[in-house]
Image: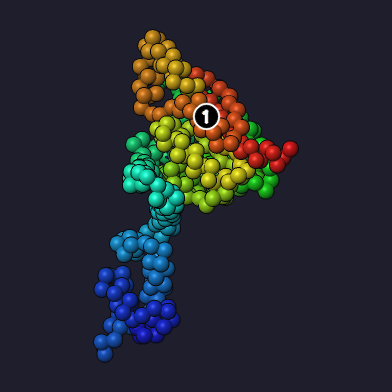
Amino acid sequence: MKITEVAKKLETTPRTIRFYEEKGLISPEKASNGYRMYTNEDVRGLRTILALREVGLSMAEIKKAMTENDDFTDYLHTQRSLLYEEMLQIRDMVTTVDRMIEKSGETGEEEHMMDMARELKGLKEKRTIWRDRWNFDDQAKDYDNNIKTTGYHFNVHKDYDEALKKLHAWVDASHGERGVDIGAGTGNLTGLFLRQGIPMIAVDQSKEMLKVCTEKHPQTQTRLGHFLSLPLHDKAADFVVSSYALHHLTDEDKELALAEIDRVIGNSGRVVIADLMFKDASNREDVLRTYQESGNEEAVEAIKDEYYADRSRLIRWWENHGYDVKAYQFNPILHLLYAQKKERRASNE
Ligand SMILES: C[S@@+](CC[C@H](N)C(=O)[O-])C[C@H]1O[C@@H](n2cnc3c(N)ncnc32)[C@H](O)[C@@H]1O
Protein backbone atom coordinates (compact mmCIF):
# COMPACT_ATOMS: atom_id res chain seq x y z
CA MET A 1 0.00 0.00 0.00
CA LYS A 2 1.23 3.51 -0.77
CA ILE A 3 1.39 6.23 1.84
CA THR A 4 -1.64 8.12 0.48
CA GLU A 5 -3.79 4.97 0.64
CA VAL A 6 -2.63 4.23 4.18
CA ALA A 7 -3.32 7.81 5.26
CA LYS A 8 -6.82 7.63 3.81
CA LYS A 9 -7.51 4.28 5.43
CA LEU A 10 -6.37 5.52 8.84
CA GLU A 11 -7.96 8.97 8.50
CA THR A 12 -4.64 10.72 8.95
CA THR A 13 -2.17 12.58 6.75
CA PRO A 14 0.90 11.34 4.84
CA ARG A 15 2.86 13.97 6.79
CA THR A 16 1.92 12.38 10.13
CA ILE A 17 2.93 8.95 8.85
CA ARG A 18 6.28 10.30 7.63
CA PHE A 19 6.81 11.91 11.02
CA TYR A 20 6.39 8.56 12.78
CA GLU A 21 8.81 7.04 10.31
CA GLU A 22 11.40 9.78 10.98
CA LYS A 23 11.03 9.07 14.71
CA GLY A 24 11.80 5.40 14.06
CA LEU A 25 8.38 4.07 15.08
CA ILE A 26 7.82 2.35 11.74
CA SER A 27 10.15 1.45 8.91
CA PRO A 28 8.31 0.57 5.70
CA GLU A 29 10.21 -1.00 2.82
CA LYS A 30 11.07 1.24 -0.10
CA ALA A 31 10.16 -0.03 -3.59
CA SER A 32 12.67 0.24 -6.49
CA ASN A 33 10.93 3.44 -7.64
CA GLY A 34 11.66 5.00 -4.22
CA TYR A 35 8.05 4.92 -2.95
CA ARG A 36 7.43 3.59 0.52
CA MET A 37 5.31 0.44 0.51
CA TYR A 38 3.32 -0.34 3.65
CA THR A 39 2.50 -3.91 4.62
CA ASN A 40 -0.59 -4.89 6.65
CA GLU A 41 1.70 -5.16 9.65
CA ASP A 42 2.91 -1.56 9.16
CA VAL A 43 -0.73 -0.45 9.00
CA ARG A 44 -1.54 -2.33 12.22
CA GLY A 45 1.47 -0.68 13.88
CA LEU A 46 0.36 2.74 12.68
CA ARG A 47 -3.15 2.13 13.96
CA THR A 48 -1.74 1.33 17.41
CA ILE A 49 0.50 4.42 17.35
CA LEU A 50 -2.39 6.72 16.40
CA ALA A 51 -4.63 5.29 19.11
CA LEU A 52 -1.97 5.55 21.80
CA ARG A 53 -1.08 9.12 20.81
CA GLU A 54 -4.76 10.04 21.07
CA VAL A 55 -4.88 8.95 24.74
CA GLY A 56 -1.73 10.93 25.48
CA LEU A 57 1.15 8.44 25.45
CA SER A 58 4.43 10.13 24.53
CA MET A 59 6.43 9.27 21.41
CA ALA A 60 9.24 8.01 23.67
CA GLU A 61 6.91 5.62 25.51
CA ILE A 62 5.42 4.28 22.28
CA LYS A 63 8.87 3.83 20.76
CA LYS A 64 10.11 1.99 23.86
CA ALA A 65 7.06 -0.29 23.90
CA MET A 66 7.40 -1.06 20.18
CA THR A 67 11.13 -1.65 20.10
CA GLU A 68 11.20 -3.69 23.30
CA ASN A 69 8.01 -5.53 22.39
CA ASP A 70 6.41 -4.57 25.71
CA ASP A 71 2.78 -5.17 26.55
CA PHE A 72 0.90 -1.91 25.80
CA THR A 73 -1.59 -2.68 28.56
CA ASP A 74 1.08 -1.89 31.12
CA TYR A 75 1.56 1.57 29.63
CA LEU A 76 -2.20 2.09 29.50
CA HIS A 77 -2.54 1.30 33.21
CA THR A 78 0.09 3.91 34.03
CA GLN A 79 -1.49 6.40 31.64
CA ARG A 80 -4.93 5.92 33.23
CA SER A 81 -3.54 6.61 36.66
CA LEU A 82 -1.75 9.77 35.42
CA LEU A 83 -4.89 10.99 33.67
CA TYR A 84 -6.94 10.61 36.86
CA GLU A 85 -4.26 12.57 38.69
CA GLU A 86 -4.51 15.35 36.08
CA MET A 87 -8.30 15.26 36.09
CA LEU A 88 -8.41 15.73 39.86
CA GLN A 89 -5.90 18.54 39.67
CA ILE A 90 -8.04 20.32 37.10
CA ARG A 91 -11.05 19.88 39.38
CA ASP A 92 -9.12 21.34 42.29
CA MET A 93 -8.21 24.30 40.07
CA VAL A 94 -11.81 24.86 38.97
CA THR A 95 -12.98 24.75 42.59
CA THR A 96 -10.34 27.33 43.50
CA VAL A 97 -11.30 29.57 40.59
CA ASP A 98 -14.95 29.37 41.74
CA ARG A 99 -13.93 30.37 45.26
CA MET A 100 -11.77 33.22 43.94
CA ILE A 101 -14.67 34.55 41.87
CA GLU A 102 -16.94 34.37 44.94
CA LYS A 103 -14.46 36.39 46.98
CA SER A 104 -13.67 38.94 44.26
CA GLY A 105 -14.50 42.52 45.18
CA GLU A 106 -14.19 41.84 48.92
CA THR A 107 -11.64 43.72 50.99
CA GLY A 108 -8.36 41.87 51.28
CA GLU A 109 -9.16 40.14 47.99
CA GLU A 110 -5.51 39.72 46.92
CA GLU A 111 -4.59 38.15 50.23
CA HIS A 112 -7.51 35.68 50.04
CA MET A 113 -6.53 34.81 46.48
CA MET A 114 -2.94 34.20 47.52
CA ASP A 115 -4.12 31.94 50.40
CA MET A 116 -6.30 29.95 48.04
CA ALA A 117 -3.47 29.64 45.52
CA ARG A 118 -1.15 28.39 48.28
CA GLU A 119 -3.74 25.85 49.40
CA LEU A 120 -4.16 24.68 45.82
CA LYS A 121 -0.41 24.28 45.38
CA GLY A 122 -0.26 22.20 48.57
CA LEU A 123 -3.07 19.97 47.34
CA LYS A 124 -1.38 19.51 43.97
CA GLU A 125 1.84 18.47 45.66
CA LYS A 126 0.02 15.99 47.89
CA ARG A 127 -1.79 14.41 44.96
CA THR A 128 1.41 13.87 43.02
CA ILE A 129 4.30 13.54 45.46
CA TRP A 130 3.44 10.37 47.43
CA ARG A 131 6.30 7.89 47.01
CA ASP A 132 6.60 4.25 48.01
CA ARG A 133 9.61 4.21 50.32
CA TRP A 134 8.85 0.60 51.39
CA ASN A 135 9.31 -0.74 47.87
CA PHE A 136 6.19 -2.90 47.69
CA ASP A 137 7.07 -4.05 44.17
CA ASP A 138 9.94 -6.02 45.69
CA GLN A 139 7.73 -7.47 48.44
CA ALA A 140 4.97 -8.70 46.11
CA LYS A 141 6.17 -12.25 45.37
CA ASP A 142 6.83 -13.19 49.02
CA TYR A 143 4.10 -11.11 50.64
CA ASP A 144 1.61 -13.92 51.27
CA ASN A 145 4.31 -16.11 52.85
CA ASN A 146 5.81 -13.30 54.89
CA ILE A 147 2.56 -12.38 56.60
CA LYS A 148 2.38 -15.92 57.96
CA THR A 149 5.82 -15.63 59.54
CA THR A 150 5.74 -15.67 63.30
CA GLY A 151 8.42 -15.75 65.96
CA TYR A 152 9.49 -12.12 65.78
CA HIS A 153 9.22 -9.94 68.87
CA PHE A 154 6.67 -7.85 67.09
CA ASN A 155 4.16 -9.26 64.67
CA VAL A 156 2.20 -6.59 62.78
CA HIS A 157 0.15 -9.32 61.14
CA LYS A 158 -1.17 -10.75 64.40
CA ASP A 159 -4.94 -11.27 63.97
CA TYR A 160 -4.62 -10.66 60.19
CA ASP A 161 -7.08 -13.36 59.09
CA GLU A 162 -9.55 -12.51 61.80
CA ALA A 163 -9.41 -8.80 60.87
CA LEU A 164 -10.05 -9.48 57.17
CA LYS A 165 -12.93 -11.84 58.01
CA LYS A 166 -14.56 -9.40 60.39
CA LEU A 167 -14.12 -6.55 57.91
CA HIS A 168 -15.81 -8.65 55.24
CA ALA A 169 -18.68 -9.47 57.61
CA TRP A 170 -19.12 -5.82 58.63
CA VAL A 171 -19.46 -4.72 54.99
CA ASP A 172 -22.33 -7.18 54.64
CA ALA A 173 -22.35 -6.72 50.87
CA SER A 174 -25.45 -7.62 48.91
CA HIS A 175 -25.63 -8.96 45.39
CA GLY A 176 -25.67 -6.17 42.84
CA GLU A 177 -23.23 -4.06 44.86
CA ARG A 178 -19.74 -3.13 43.67
CA GLY A 179 -16.73 -2.75 45.92
CA VAL A 180 -13.27 -1.24 45.76
CA ASP A 181 -10.27 -2.45 47.76
CA ILE A 182 -7.57 0.22 48.10
CA GLY A 183 -4.00 -0.86 48.74
CA ALA A 184 -5.30 -4.29 47.77
CA GLY A 185 -1.83 -5.83 47.58
CA THR A 186 -2.03 -9.49 46.62
CA GLY A 187 -5.82 -9.42 46.94
CA ASN A 188 -6.47 -11.37 50.15
CA LEU A 189 -9.34 -9.10 51.17
CA THR A 190 -10.58 -8.67 47.59
CA GLY A 191 -10.78 -12.47 47.39
CA LEU A 192 -13.29 -12.72 50.25
CA PHE A 193 -15.75 -10.54 48.32
CA LEU A 194 -15.09 -12.22 44.97
CA ARG A 195 -15.85 -15.62 46.51
CA GLN A 196 -19.18 -14.19 47.55
CA GLY A 197 -19.88 -13.09 43.95
CA ILE A 198 -19.34 -9.37 44.58
CA PRO A 199 -17.42 -7.63 41.76
CA MET A 200 -14.34 -5.82 43.05
CA ILE A 201 -11.84 -3.31 41.75
CA ALA A 202 -8.43 -3.75 43.34
CA VAL A 203 -6.46 -0.49 43.50
CA ASP A 204 -2.80 -0.42 44.41
CA GLN A 205 0.20 1.78 43.71
CA SER A 206 2.39 -1.30 43.14
CA LYS A 207 2.29 -2.96 39.71
CA GLU A 208 3.90 -6.10 41.05
CA MET A 209 1.33 -6.46 43.84
CA LEU A 210 -1.43 -6.08 41.26
CA LYS A 211 0.20 -8.74 39.08
CA VAL A 212 0.07 -11.24 41.97
CA CYS A 213 -3.51 -10.17 42.69
CA THR A 214 -4.49 -10.86 39.06
CA GLU A 215 -2.78 -14.26 39.11
CA LYS A 216 -4.77 -15.22 42.20
CA HIS A 217 -8.04 -13.61 41.14
CA PRO A 218 -8.22 -13.33 37.34
CA GLN A 219 -11.84 -12.18 37.60
CA THR A 220 -10.98 -8.96 39.44
CA GLN A 221 -10.33 -5.63 37.77
CA THR A 222 -7.10 -4.00 38.86
CA ARG A 223 -6.19 -0.34 38.77
CA LEU A 224 -2.84 1.22 39.30
CA GLY A 225 -3.19 4.29 41.47
CA HIS A 226 -2.92 5.68 44.95
CA PHE A 227 -5.07 6.85 47.83
CA LEU A 228 -4.65 10.57 47.13
CA SER A 229 -5.70 10.38 43.47
CA LEU A 230 -7.96 7.39 43.18
CA PRO A 231 -8.19 6.11 39.59
CA LEU A 232 -11.98 5.90 39.83
CA HIS A 233 -14.96 7.97 38.80
CA ASP A 234 -17.22 9.63 41.35
CA LYS A 235 -19.71 7.20 42.90
CA ALA A 236 -17.93 4.26 41.27
CA ALA A 237 -18.54 1.97 44.26
CA ASP A 238 -21.13 1.03 46.86
CA PHE A 239 -18.41 0.37 49.40
CA VAL A 240 -14.70 0.88 49.82
CA VAL A 241 -12.50 -1.39 51.91
CA SER A 242 -8.85 -1.28 52.82
CA SER A 243 -6.59 -3.39 55.02
CA TYR A 244 -3.08 -2.65 56.26
CA ALA A 245 -2.56 0.11 53.68
CA LEU A 246 -3.66 3.49 55.05
CA HIS A 247 -0.81 3.60 57.56
CA HIS A 248 1.61 4.41 54.75
CA LEU A 249 0.17 7.93 54.64
CA THR A 250 0.75 10.70 57.17
CA ASP A 251 -2.27 11.64 59.31
CA GLU A 252 -2.80 14.76 57.21
CA ASP A 253 -2.69 12.77 53.97
CA LYS A 254 -5.06 10.21 55.46
CA GLU A 255 -7.71 12.94 55.62
CA LEU A 256 -7.27 13.67 51.91
CA ALA A 257 -7.53 9.91 51.30
CA LEU A 258 -10.85 9.85 53.22
CA ALA A 259 -12.07 12.72 51.04
CA GLU A 260 -11.09 10.77 47.93
CA ILE A 261 -12.95 7.69 49.22
CA ASP A 262 -15.93 9.91 49.97
CA ARG A 263 -15.92 11.06 46.32
CA VAL A 264 -15.89 7.45 45.12
CA ILE A 265 -18.79 6.22 47.28
CA GLY A 266 -21.02 9.22 46.61
CA ASN A 267 -23.90 9.88 48.96
CA SER A 268 -24.83 6.41 50.02
CA GLY A 269 -21.76 4.30 50.57
CA ARG A 270 -19.77 2.80 53.37
CA VAL A 271 -16.10 2.48 54.14
CA VAL A 272 -14.53 -0.26 56.23
CA ILE A 273 -10.87 -0.12 57.17
CA ALA A 274 -8.73 -2.56 59.13
CA ASP A 275 -5.37 -1.06 59.95
CA LEU A 276 -2.58 -0.35 62.37
CA MET A 277 -3.60 2.52 64.60
CA PHE A 278 -3.92 3.88 68.10
CA LYS A 279 -7.04 5.17 69.77
CA ASP A 280 -5.46 8.62 70.02
CA ALA A 281 -2.15 10.40 70.62
CA SER A 282 -2.00 9.51 74.30
CA ASN A 283 -2.77 5.83 73.61
CA ARG A 284 0.15 5.89 71.11
CA GLU A 285 2.48 7.16 73.82
CA ASP A 286 1.22 4.51 76.28
CA VAL A 287 1.66 1.63 73.83
CA LEU A 288 5.11 2.84 72.76
CA ARG A 289 6.14 3.19 76.41
CA THR A 290 5.00 -0.36 77.15
CA TYR A 291 7.11 -1.72 74.27
CA GLN A 292 10.07 0.42 75.32
CA GLU A 293 9.87 -0.71 78.95
CA SER A 294 9.77 -4.35 77.90
CA GLY A 295 12.87 -3.78 75.72
CA ASN A 296 11.01 -4.47 72.47
CA GLU A 297 13.05 -2.19 70.20
CA GLU A 298 11.77 -4.02 67.13
CA ALA A 299 8.24 -2.85 67.92
CA VAL A 300 9.31 0.72 68.62
CA GLU A 301 11.28 0.95 65.36
CA ALA A 302 8.49 -0.61 63.30
CA ILE A 303 5.90 1.79 64.71
CA LYS A 304 8.09 4.82 64.15
CA ASP A 305 8.87 3.79 60.56
CA GLU A 306 5.24 4.05 59.50
CA TYR A 307 2.25 6.28 60.19
CA TYR A 308 -0.06 4.26 62.42
CA ALA A 309 -3.28 6.25 62.42
CA ASP A 310 -4.70 8.34 65.20
CA ARG A 311 -8.12 6.65 65.25
CA SER A 312 -9.79 9.63 66.92
CA ARG A 313 -8.74 11.85 64.01
CA LEU A 314 -10.22 9.52 61.39
CA ILE A 315 -13.46 9.22 63.36
CA ARG A 316 -13.66 13.00 63.78
CA TRP A 317 -13.17 13.51 60.04
CA TRP A 318 -16.01 11.11 59.22
CA GLU A 319 -18.34 12.55 61.85
CA ASN A 320 -17.72 16.06 60.47
CA HIS A 321 -18.62 14.79 57.00
CA GLY A 322 -21.95 13.17 57.85
CA TYR A 323 -21.00 9.58 58.64
CA ASP A 324 -21.95 7.26 61.48
CA VAL A 325 -18.90 5.41 62.73
CA LYS A 326 -18.24 2.29 64.78
CA ALA A 327 -14.94 0.77 65.85
CA TYR A 328 -13.49 -2.53 67.05
CA GLN A 329 -10.06 -3.29 68.47
CA PHE A 330 -8.27 -6.62 67.87
CA ASN A 331 -5.03 -5.96 69.76
CA PRO A 332 -3.00 -2.92 70.92
CA ILE A 333 -2.23 -1.82 67.35
CA LEU A 334 -4.92 -3.31 65.11
CA HIS A 335 -8.37 -1.74 64.77
CA LEU A 336 -11.38 -1.98 62.51
CA LEU A 337 -13.40 1.09 61.54
CA TYR A 338 -16.77 1.21 59.83
CA ALA A 339 -18.13 4.49 58.48
CA GLN A 340 -21.48 4.80 56.82
CA LYS A 341 -22.97 7.84 55.15
CA LYS A 342 -26.09 8.91 57.07
CA GLU A 343 -28.08 9.19 53.83
CA ARG A 344 -27.71 5.45 53.28
CA ARG A 345 -28.97 4.59 56.73
CA ALA A 346 -31.87 7.00 56.30
CA SER A 347 -32.86 5.45 52.96
CA ASN A 348 -32.72 1.96 54.49
CA GLU A 349 -34.93 2.84 57.42
C1 LIG B 1 0.96 -4.24 53.81
S1 LIG B 1 0.27 -4.30 52.20
C2 LIG B 1 -1.43 -4.77 52.51
C3 LIG B 1 -2.03 -5.50 51.35
C4 LIG B 1 -3.45 -6.03 51.56
N1 LIG B 1 -4.42 -4.97 51.69
C5 LIG B 1 -3.52 -6.97 52.73
O1 LIG B 1 -4.28 -6.70 53.67
O2 LIG B 1 -2.83 -7.98 52.71
C6 LIG B 1 0.11 -2.61 51.80
C7 LIG B 1 -0.35 -2.38 50.37
O3 LIG B 1 -0.78 -1.04 50.27
C8 LIG B 1 -0.26 -0.48 49.10
N2 LIG B 1 -0.13 0.95 49.33
C9 LIG B 1 0.66 1.57 50.23
N3 LIG B 1 0.48 2.90 50.15
C10 LIG B 1 -0.43 3.11 49.17
C11 LIG B 1 -1.00 4.28 48.60
N4 LIG B 1 -0.68 5.48 49.02
N5 LIG B 1 -1.91 4.13 47.62
C12 LIG B 1 -2.25 2.88 47.17
N6 LIG B 1 -1.72 1.74 47.65
C13 LIG B 1 -0.82 1.87 48.65
C14 LIG B 1 1.08 -1.15 48.90
O4 LIG B 1 1.52 -1.08 47.57
C15 LIG B 1 0.75 -2.56 49.35
O5 LIG B 1 0.30 -3.36 48.30
When the figure is inspected, residue 84 is found, relative to residue 107, above or below; the finding is below
In the rendered view, would you say 77 is above or below 286?
below
Residue at the image position 26 percent from the left and 90 percent from the top: 33
Residue 15 in view here: yes
Residue 306 placement (x, y as % from top left):
39, 29
- Give the residue pinned by disc 1: 316
The amino acid at mark 1 is Arg
The quarter of the picture where the C terminus appears is: top right
Residue pictured at 39% horizontal, 78% vertical: 12
Q: Quadrant of residue 226?
A: top left
- Corner quadrant of residue 269: top right
Frontmost residue, 170 versus 98: 98
**Position of residue 156 measured from the top left corner of the image (x, y, whole percent):** 46, 25
In the picture, measured across the screen, residue 246 lies left or right of residue 235, that is left
- Mark 1 residue element: helix
- The residue located at (55%, 37%) in the rendering is 321
